[in-house]
Amino acid sequence: MAFEKKSHYKEVLMDAIIDIAKENDKVVFLDADLSSCIGSTAFEKVFPERFFNCGIAEANMVGVAAGLASTGMVPFVHSFGCFASRRVYDQLFLSVGYTHQTVHVIGSDPGITAQYNGGTHMPFEDIALMRQIPNMAIVEPSDDYSLYMLTKAVYENGTSSYIRTPRKGINSIYSDGEEIKLGKAKVLREGDDVAIISLGAHLVTESLKAYDILKEQGVNATVIDLLSIKPMDEETILEVAKKCGKVLVCENGRYAGGVGEGIASLLAKNYPCLMDFICVGERFGEVGNLKYLASAFGFTADNIAAKALSLAKK
């Protein structure tokens, strides 16, 4: 299996799954009539007998996947993040989680990356939902290479997983060959004044820009790409909290049940420190392009820098 540069996240994702399927003839792919959106037609071309379009019936698709898993197959299933989490939750919790089946769920276009599909298709609560399912790994890659490697990693982990990824565009942070592991965060910049813990392509990129803004103001920040939500890299989080004493968590999702709340709980028990959060509060999504939505929800380098600066001064 080898990573190759592509133009869109969805192409990298399909490359990873096709490479996995070449190594294991038990791997199958189920889609909810969104083949053209996620590019799963590429999988169908290589493995037509192992591809199943379940139609716009997401809950049924997960039920089918659970049945296939019970016979020894290894299903990957896809739908937009709103449908891959909220709509199928009972089936995921019971048919997959409770019965200890292994199904890998792809929730595409999470949070503001849903853009023009608007609030109805904008899952801010998918992380919170998936964190409640015992033994389910949750990852949110930040670039093309981490998407490829974490897709492979959750498969090799052997338990069910939720892969949170945009479909369109591409971002490159990591070099081919760099170690990307499930349960391990990456420290991208180092400083002693404040720690910025981010996840996802958009917010990690904006956090790196915020680092430069802060540097110009004499503030040295540590920037961490979380990558793996569950299992979470508690060791790295505790280390950076002890070093900086101030932690800003940035997530393209809701605070309640999300990453920020999870890190706050970890630090409250082990190393209480000053914290702040960039996330979605008591709001629903709305229609717009990524630039507009990032500004509307405060997911920008300027806002990250401002919050981090405020923390650093306390």
Image: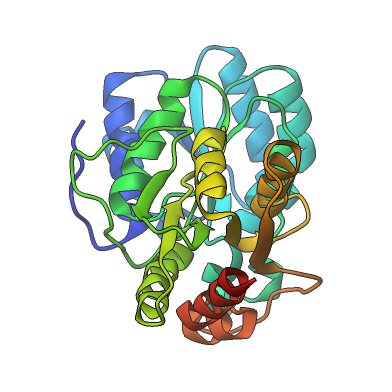
Which residue is at 76% across, 49% downward?
A: 257
Q: Is residue 219 left or right of residue 78?
A: left
Q: Position of residue 271 (x, y in %)?
A: 67, 42
**Quadrant occupied by the N terminus:** top left
Q: Position of residue 252 (x, y in %)?
A: 59, 64
Looking at the image, residue 106 lies above or below residue 99? below
Which residue is at 69% across, 40% downward?
A: 266
Q: Is residue 283 left or right of residue 266?
A: right
Q: Position of residue 63 (x, y in %)?
A: 69, 31
**Quadrant occupied by the C terminus:** bottom right
Looking at the image, residue 219 lies above or below residue 143? below
Q: How is the image coloured?
A: rainbow
Residue in the foreground of this view, choosing between 218 and 55: 218
Q: How many marks?
A: 0
Examine the rendering and report whether any part of residue 27 can be seen: no
Q: Is residue 257 left or right of residue 77?
A: right
Q: Quadrant of residue 136?
A: top right
Looking at the image, residue 151 lies above or below residue 9? above
Q: Position of residue 67 (x, y in %)?
A: 64, 21
Which residue is at 71% across, 25% downward?
A: 97
Examine the rendering and report whether any part of residue 301 can be seen: yes
Residue in the foreground of this view, choosing between 11 and 49: 11
Q: Quadrant of residue 43?
A: top left
